[in-house]
Image (cartoon, rainbow, N blue to C red):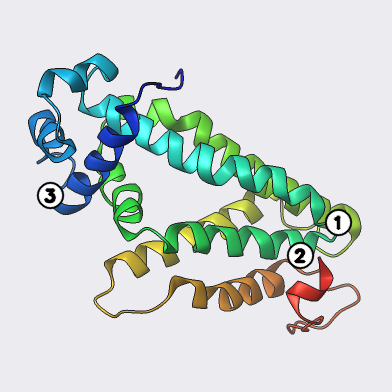
Amino acid sequence: MAKKTGEKVPIILQAAKEIFAQSGYHQTSIAAIAKKAGIAEGTVYIYFENKEDILITLFETTIRDEFLNKLENHLPFFKDANLALYEIVRAHFEFFGKDRQLTRVIQIELRQTTPTFIEAIKPVLKKHSVIIEEVIRKGQEQGVFRKDISCRNARKLVFGTLDEMVTCWVLSTKEYDLFEMVEPAYKLFYQALMNLSDEPLVYKKRGSYENQI
């Protein structure tokens, strides 16, 4: 989908995010989004075809542009695949942890949409999968990650766990910082993926993360 442009686009997307998170995607109308944005309902249609178009654009401008593109550009600086994996975990929790409304839309509302919507966001989902698999493959080539697990299955382990932990956080009635889950999640992946040919099945702290980048 071509990137939406225009001075009202960010205003509409912000209003839609807030309304979707509060009232739910299916219960939200274009009129409600327009009212929240402080513009006429007809103005919304200048930029977007319908409500689904707004949700797709919100997903692309946040997950693709603000999260995945930045992560993809940053990962090459991490020569050690272990540290690259840590960065994936850190970036994931940092991004979702800073905006609970957006996280609720992505984790809850987005998954109750139509097959048309899912088809539209497939390229972004594919991009996320490729980023994770490339780090797994790099670790296998470096000999630090086990090779008896396919990159695809390892990616499912990583993404599935991160996704579930974010969903639990946004649905929890208990207040806690999502960023606190970085270390536990990374330890889990490290122990599951490490090459057992020359190391025991334990997590070895290799010095602080900050000192190795």
In the picture, measured across the screen, residue 19 lies left or right of residue 142, that is left
Residue 46 rendering spot, x and y as whole percentages: 24, 15
Q: Name the residue under label 2.
A: 83
Q: Which mark is residue 23?
A: 3
In the rendered image, which quarter is residue 148 located in?
A: bottom right
Q: How far from the left and from the top, in percent, is residue 115?
A: 31, 29
Secondary structure under tag 2 reads helix
In whole angstroms, how far apart are the C-alphas of marks 3 and 1?
44 Å
Crowd tier of the residue under label 3, counting other residues whose Cα lies within 10 Å: few below 14, some 14–19, many 20 or above: few
Residue drawn where x is 66% and y is 49% of the image: 132
Q: Which label number is shown at residue 79?
A: 1
- Look at the numbered disc 3 and give the secondary structure of its residue: helix
Q: Position of residue 190 (x, y in %)?
A: 70, 71
Numbered circles on residues, count: 3
Task: Find numbered disc 1 in the image and state the secondary structure of the residue it sits on.
Answer: loop
Amino acid type of the residue that numbered disc 2 sits on in the rendered structure: Leu
Which residue corresponds to the image point at 40% horizontal and 26% vertical from the top-left? 119
Q: Is 190 drawn above or below residue 166 in the view shown?
A: below
Q: Which mark is residue 48?
A: none
For the residues labelled 2 and 3, the Cα–Cα distance comes to 39 Å
Q: On the picture, is 13 further left or further right than 28?
A: right
The foreground one among 33 and 182 is: 33
**Residue 194, located in which quarter of the rendered image?**
bottom right
Task: Give percent across and percent down for residue 126.
Answer: 56, 35
| Nearer to us in this view, 148 or 126 | 126
Q: Are the residues tagged 1 and 2 within 8 Å (C-beta)?
A: yes
Q: In which quarter of the image is residue 83?
A: bottom right
Question: Left or right of 185: which side holds 203?
Answer: right
